[in-house]
Amino acid sequence: MEATGDGRGKIGYVIRMIRFQSSWSRRPFLSFVLAAALAALPGLAIGLGIGLVPGPARAGVGAWVTFEGGMVRLVSAGPLTDGTYGAGLEFALEPGWHTYWMHPGEAGIPPELDARPSSNIAMVAVQFPYPERYDDGFSQSNIYKDGVLLPLVVTPQDPARPVDLDLTVTFGICKEICIPGEARVALALEPAAQPDPASARAIARALADVPGAPGPDSPQVSRLFLRKDAQKEKLDISLALPAGLTLDDVSVFVAAPDALSLGVPRRRQPDWKKATGDWVLALSGLPKSRTEVTLSFVLVAGGKAVTQTVRLNRDTGVAVAVDAPPSLAATR
């Protein structure tokens, strides 16, 4: 999976057949009830179960496509800006249902998005608002509930021509049980379209929840320590915190490319005598042949998220910072 982004420290991935987790921003702009009411209006094509290609709704907003547990559509801020379109993949989930972040954690189905049916597309990049941790009593996962809007940056091949954005989305959707979901959503992007203020505001709200580069007032990963004990491989994570923050104020998420299997970072327990960091991440799910792995750490505190990326050599235990402060230390 190729990583990209619109700024230093942002998490983004080029969409071809890419894995991502979907959901609603922390400040949803439509409740599921309102979305369902809008979907029932004449002229909006709604697929049942497996989503169908929706017909046009209004400029900047595609038709809702339903699946068990919710619905999904495409939205656009409007005309071409700086050579790209600002758009979003918006999920509205029924109460009690959830779906997953780009790395699901110890359980869950990471969705896939296929943009190949689209026309006049050079690249589509997706960004992910930070998730929340979910514990079902057996495993912990990284989820979105209620809904989410995933910001998209769409780059056309020919800026003078319209873009037909046509996406097939597959994903995991869970309540008491988890089932696969699928929907096909579409939206025409016109270079001279009128701005859509409502969609632009919704996309901006979602972008505010996308992790950015750490600053002086944000928590940061300060040290990594790789431990190998028999068949177990664990990464101890230490954080540097600004004044006024404690470890209880911070949530830690970790993602890896190529759908690599990772655990979920857990706070160090008193009986974990060998642990040297504030958090412990199990790496035992990684294939032994993968000597180097790139890990993106997302730290959330006070409703703001930052990200740091490192390239870890599992043979030497050395981690090299990627788009992260040079002060990041890694030892073994």
Image (cartoon, rainbow, N blue to C red):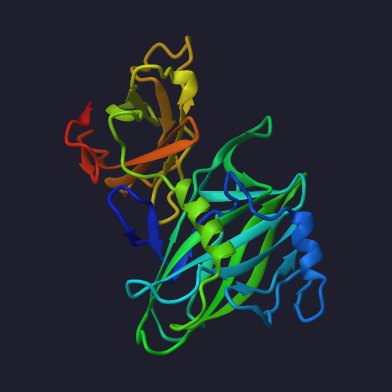
Q: Residue furthest left?
A: 326
Q: Quadrant of residue 47?
A: bottom right
**Relative side of 31 to 303, left or right:** right
Q: The N terminus appears in which quarter of the rendering?
A: bottom left
Question: Residue 34, position in %: x, y?
Answer: 77, 58
**Relative side of 94 to 99, left or right:** right
Question: Residue 324, position in %: x, y?
Answer: 24, 41
Q: Which residue shows up at 48% across the image and 26% down it? A: 266
Question: Residue 140, position in %: x, y?
Answer: 59, 35
Q: Specify whether residue 68 is in view.
A: no
**Relative side of 215 to 331, left or right:** right
Count of marks, rendered view: 0
Q: Specify whether residue 149 is in view.
A: yes
- Can you say whether 85 is above or below 317 in the image? below
Q: Which residue shows up at 44% across the image and 19% down it? A: 247
Q: The C terminus appears in which quarter of the rendering?
A: top left
Question: Residue 124, position in %: x, y?
Answer: 41, 70
- Can you say whether 197 is above or below 121 in the image? above
Q: Residue furthest bottom?
A: 161
Q: Quadrant of residue 277?
A: top left
Q: Which residue shows up at 35% across the image and 25% down it? A: 236
**Relative side of 127 to 33, left or right:** left
252 or 210, which is in the foreground?
A: 210
